[in-house]
Amino acid sequence: MGRGKIVIRRIDNSTSRQVTFSKRRKGLIKKAKELAILCDAEVGLVIFSSTGKLYEFASTSLKSVIERFNSLKEEHQQLLNPSSEVKFWQREAAILRQQVQNLQENHRQLLGEQLYGLRVEELQNLENQLEMSLKGVRMKKGNLIHQENVELCKKVNLVRKENTELYKKVYGNGNGLNSYGFGCGDGSNVPVHLQLSPPERDND
């Protein structure tokens, strides 16, 4: 036969009540540990016995769990209170304005303005920022030059091909084609040129 349904009510017998408390407390802490490990949850558990004895469990630390709880509770209450919500967004706007002001001041200093009053460490940090910016500009410029060279090389090869085809049409497949061609990146500096013989005049 299965166990009968347990009626959830206060246990009158003090000895039975203490035994049940000990068993249920251990089971509750075990479940809290499993929840924290299996689900990557932050768990905090506080138990006071009928005699006032404290039992606690926390997946990180009980202090951090309580601080997080109070912080979220305060934010929740602020969202429920319109006046508190307005103050919250006012604080956020003030923080953003300060960040924008700091960025503008840093930008002016990078341009060489408003450098008075800066400490040596701040000037060195500013110099390091400028050096990093210059390196980035040089690298970007070098990449652009390389890309332009690649495009120019493609155009040179296209001109070479067109001149070769034209030479074949005019002179046929005779020798001397190499003197009119040049490559890109192979050390050849022979310019592209094409010279045609003038047509012969009939002697009447």
Image (cartoon, rainbow, N blue to C red):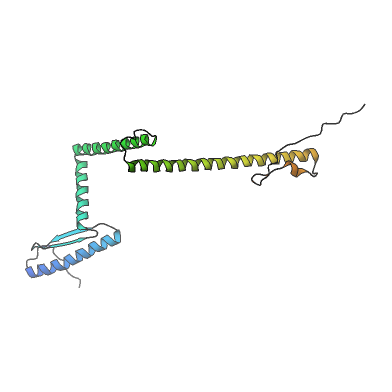
In this view, which residue lies farthest toward the front? 120
Between 5 and 28, the one nearer to me in the picture: 28
Q: Quadrant of residue 158?
A: top right
Between 9 and 67, the one nearer to me in the picture: 67
Q: Quadrant of residue 195?
A: top right
Residue at x-position 20% and y-position 37%: 82
**Quadrant where the C terminus is found in the figure:** top right
Residue 182 located left or right of residue 52: right
In this view, which residue lies farthest toward the top? 204
**Residue 39 in the image: above or below residue 99:** below
Q: Position of residue 64 (x, y in %)?
A: 22, 54
Q: Position of residue 77 (x, y in %)?
A: 19, 44
Residue at x-position 19% and y-position 45%: 74
Figure disc tally = 0
Q: Quadrant of residue 13?
A: bottom left
Q: Position of residue 128 (x, y in %)?
A: 40, 43
**Quadrant where the N terminus is found in the figure:** bottom left
Residue at x-position 22% and y-position 58%: 61
Between 108 and 52, the one nearer to me in the picture: 108
**Residue 125 in the image: above or below residue 67:** above
In this view, which residue lies farthest toward the right? 204
Q: Position of residue 102 (x, y in %)?
A: 32, 37
**Residue 170 in the image: above or below residue 20:** above
